[in-house]
Image (tube, coloured by chain):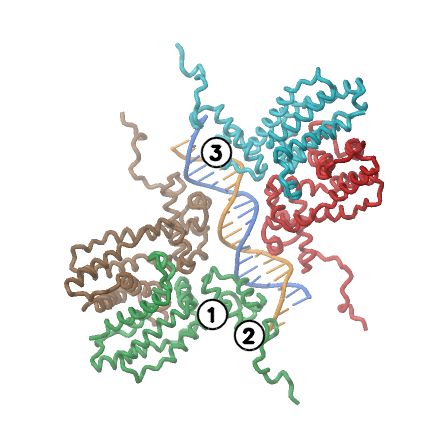
Chain colours: A red, B cyan, C green, D brown, E blue, F orange
DNA sequence: CATGAATGAGATTTCATTCAT
DNA sequence: TATGAATGAAATCTCATTCAT
């Protein structure tokens, strides 16, 4: 006779506090990501994170040591997420121009969908990349985009559609720049220009513009 | 009868604490700018600012009301400074391409020379432009660059050297983007790429690249 | 039929966690003794003791009730150990002077070999002997040294080698004092005198001195 | 005309909180000495110290940095006090035996009157003299007693009343030992011997005994 | 205007102990 | 017996702000 206890229950939903360490850890991390994103490192409150995650505050220290440790874990997870998403891009068999367009759009869309990445990057730079430097985990996560860009540039140059001698790192930075600044500074820019830069069609327009700028630069 | 107090003494150097209101105020603002730049709003310490400025802490409250008031004053002064610098640019009688090049280089050089502007912009966006929105003073300070860009674009289009139908706001944002992201994220970028992006020739290379990107986009 | 469980397996080495109550208890006590010795009652951490002993924290509560109960057990074991060692001394048929010398050296050597006893004594006095007073077990463990001293004093006085009318309790306290203070305060004394008082020959010199002081006092 | 405000008011009693920094500092130090004496470093509570001293808790951090800093200040003051008391002893023109008796009684009486010194010494040794080693102030405060003992020993030896070749440091330690152990361990000793060792005549008896032991050792 | 001590609210962190399995 | 996650109370420390002079 089958006993229900012998097989693991199929992903039953549990509440935090119900002795599911993975879930507890994940709940903390999720709440912490939101808190650090919206308040920065110094503005974030451990108490808020505990409340938001529905977890006993003590658990934060149990799993992450201290506030800095929690911030580092958030940073690592956030970096890890973008790196994994980047790895999903396969541009090897694409036409260089199409591939580059795809890469630019991917970056832009990622920034739109992941404000936490932008905010944490800002926070990290305010702190002079103190945590990034400390994290072996992140330093090992090199972005594959630079390699993809190099490859596209080489193929495009060979086909005569891209100018030769483009520095892939400069280009990578420029592609990121054009989206980052817009999204990261959306509040000040929207205020100063008196219009909502995050309206759907404003985002679409900006995306087209970025592609246009980058491809104009690359084209021979 | 002449009273010594009625005429201002001729620029004698005074120490803080010597009852020179203007000097005290300026000392506070200078120290506060440095503190908010390096620590953000939440990380900044009123005590540090007092110590750094050599001024009694109470004076900060006397002159600026509270910490937020001080931050707002710093923000206003910083915005005011860049707007004044921008006004110094005279491109009306310049060749459109040269004028554009000048404008791009001005922006890039300003970012290099004024990290406090970049940092405060980041801080302000973290706080959803709360202070910027509150400040009539800043909202009145529209950047003249958008107007200059419009004018250059119009003249360039007329001369057939620039493509028509370029949105000056998009372009303004892009010009700023390409410098802002690089300087603002110099710590994380330098860490990840394993090289010092702020070395003099790295900065020069980046400046050339930015000019190249923008002018490539504009050229017909 | 023989059941494996009825006879104890012949001293096979087990790991903690393998359901050997005696071993678990002993491991906890050993780790706790080290912890209380080096940190005192308030400085000791239940978590450290669990980790040091390789035993689950819950077991500490299972076996000893609470932290205080564990401390009491450590205190009792430590007192028990010195009492048992003292009982091993047989001075009845010794020449009084030799016997006294033996007793003094025994005490001194015990203090050298058992810093946990000295430290716990200090801790216990900081707490006004609260635990000692609570422990019937310890109060029943009278030191046999006082009796031995009495006997030696009586025989020595009779033989005319010791002064009469020496209070054995005062003498016992003095013998302990001369060693206790030196070993117990070795860190401050070594620091202040700028030399290592626990070097082997320093210890030997101190031992000779203590014997000399006590016997000088006793001799007629 | 004399204005009352021009002359400093003659030592009017003020309550803590009345803006008398010296008094505030002293009140904290006094309460902290009592707290650390009765509870040790780890058992002491900053909150208790604040309450006992009638001072806002924040002031403790204002004046002493942190709990460790406060403990260090207490330790320094306590050491400073005994050193100053020792300096008050003038034995140069005394008969060696009388001088030695005086020195022994001084030490004994100091220990009776200053339980805080004994307790802090115990606490400090539990912490391996960590704070003592850190304090330049204390390390510079060498006890003058060793010098006084040397001098008395030399004169006594010359006069033929003391044995020659006595190590003044060993003797100093022994004099301290005989009183320290008794007072420091009064709770355990009283419990074990079932009598109050701190009754006035018990103290007097112990004092006589200590003098007897030390002088017996010294006499030729 | 200027000073430095004082304050209270709240932040992070610690710790003995208990719970669910 | 044994485990490791969870808890709540309380500890240390921080910080913007105000008070008395």
Tell me the residue that label 1 is attached to.
C74
Sequence-first tag of 1 and 2? 2
Compute the Cα span from label 1 to label 2: 15 Å
Query: Regarding mark 1 in the picture, which secondary structure is present there?
Result: helix
Q: Are marks 3 and 2 in contact (CB under 8 Å)?
A: no
Q: Up-down: is C114 above or below E6?
A: below
The subunit carrying tag 2 is C
Q: Position of residue C56 (x, y in %)?
A: 59, 67
Visible residue check, residue A179: no
Residue at 79% x, 25% y: name it: B219
Is disc 3 on the same chain as disc 1?
Answer: no
Foreground label between 3 and 2: 2
Q: Tell me the number on the disc at residue C23.
A: 2
Tell me the residue that label 3 is attached to.
B57
Q: Up-down: is A67 above or below C152?
A: above
Q: Quadrant of residue B140?
A: top right
The subunit carrying tag 3 is B
- Classed neighbour count for the residue bearing mark 2: other residues with Cα under 10 Å, few (<14), some (14–19), many (≥20): some
Visible residue check, residue B124: yes
Q: Tell me the number on the disc at residue A138.
A: none
Query: Regarding mark 3 in the picture, which secondary structure is present there?
Result: helix
- Classed neighbour count for the residue bearing mark 3: other residues with Cα under 10 Å, few (<14), some (14–19), many (≥20): some
Q: Nearer the viewer, residue A66 or D111?
A: A66
């Amino acid at each position: 006779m089958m006993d229900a206890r012998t097989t693991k229950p199929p992903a039953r939903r549990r509440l935090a506090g119900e002795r599911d360490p993975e879930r507890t850890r994940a709940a903390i991390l999720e709440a912490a990501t939101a808190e650090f994103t919206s308040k920065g490192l110094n503005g974030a409150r451990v108490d808020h994170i505990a409340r938001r995650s529905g977890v006993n505050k003590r658990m934060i220290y149990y799993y992450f040591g201290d506030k800095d440790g929690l911030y580092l874990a958030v940073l690592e997870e956030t970096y890890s997420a973008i790196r994994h998403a980047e790895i999903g891009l396969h541009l090897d068999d694409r036409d260089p121009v199409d591939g580059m367009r795809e890469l630019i759009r991917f970056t832009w869309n990622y920034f739109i969908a992941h404000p936490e990445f932008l905010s944490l990057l800002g926070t990290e730079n305010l702190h002079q990349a103190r945590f990034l430097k400390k994290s072996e985990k992140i330093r090992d996560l090199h972005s594959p985009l630079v390699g993809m860009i190099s490859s596209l540039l080489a193929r495009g140059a060979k086909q005569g559609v891209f100018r030769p001698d483009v520095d892939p790192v400069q280009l990578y930075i420029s592609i990121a720049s054009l989206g980052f600044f817009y999204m990261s500074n959306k509040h000040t820019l929207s205020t100063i220009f008196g219009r909502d830069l995050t309206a759907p069609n404003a985002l679409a327009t900006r995306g087209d513009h970025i592609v246009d700028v980058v491809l104009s630069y690359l084209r021979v």
